[in-house]
Image (cartoon, rainbow, N blue to C red):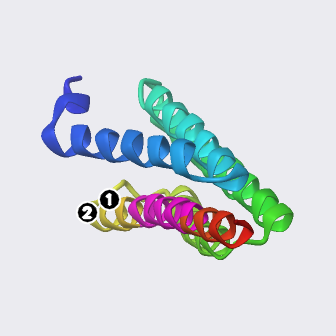
Amino acid sequence: MLSHLQPLVLFGWLLLATTCFVAWRCGGRPERSGAALVLAITLGFALAGSITDKSVTRAVYLLLDGVLALGLLMLAVRHATRWLGVAVLLQGVQFSLHAYYLVAARKYDNLYALVNNLVSLGVLLCLLAGSILARRWRKASDAAAK
């Protein structure tokens, strides 16, 4: 019940909030859209965790990962940035992880937690790197225009 108040979970939420803030403040349109998508899906995961039926929860997790992967893919096709390409590949890994555990009817274990957290961290780092690079590119183009 109080798992959302553990220090590591709170650090994850802080990292998510910081990354989304930087993306919104420093990034361009793709970074802002990506931040909104990642934030919305993460909130969906938090809400899905309160479902009491674990088989439904697993299906909702798979659905949310699919929606995030599809949303990032649509952004990557539209904007063609490197960070989005890497984020789409990472989301493919995460979707495959959820699908494997759902189809094999395996209980979530330490390997699942490790891969899930590393992939989520990777997506956040891609978003952060994309935001910083977008800001640098914008500053360089503004300086060249003057």
Q: CA distance from mark 1 to mark 2?
A: 5 Å
Residue farthest toward the left in the current orientation of the protein: 7
Is 115 in the magenta?
Answer: no
Note whether residue 126 is visible.
yes
Three-letter code for the amino acid on which mark 2 is drawn: Asn
Spot occupied by residue 134 in the image (x, y as percentages of width and height): 60, 63
Residue 110's mark? 2
Image quarter hosting the C terminus: bottom right
Residue drawn at (43%, 64%), measured in percent from left and top? 125
Element assignment for label 1: helix
Three-letter code for the amino acid on which mark 1 is drawn: Ala
Residue identifier under label 1: 113
**As rendered, which of 124 and 92 lies closer to the eye?**
124
Spot occupied by residue 105 in the image (x, y as percentages of width and height): 49, 56
Q: Which residues are magenta?
A: 119-135
**As rendered, which of 53 and 36 lies closer to the eye?**
36
Residue 57's mark? none
Dot 2: few (<14), some (14–19), or many (≥20) neighbours within 10 Å?
A: few
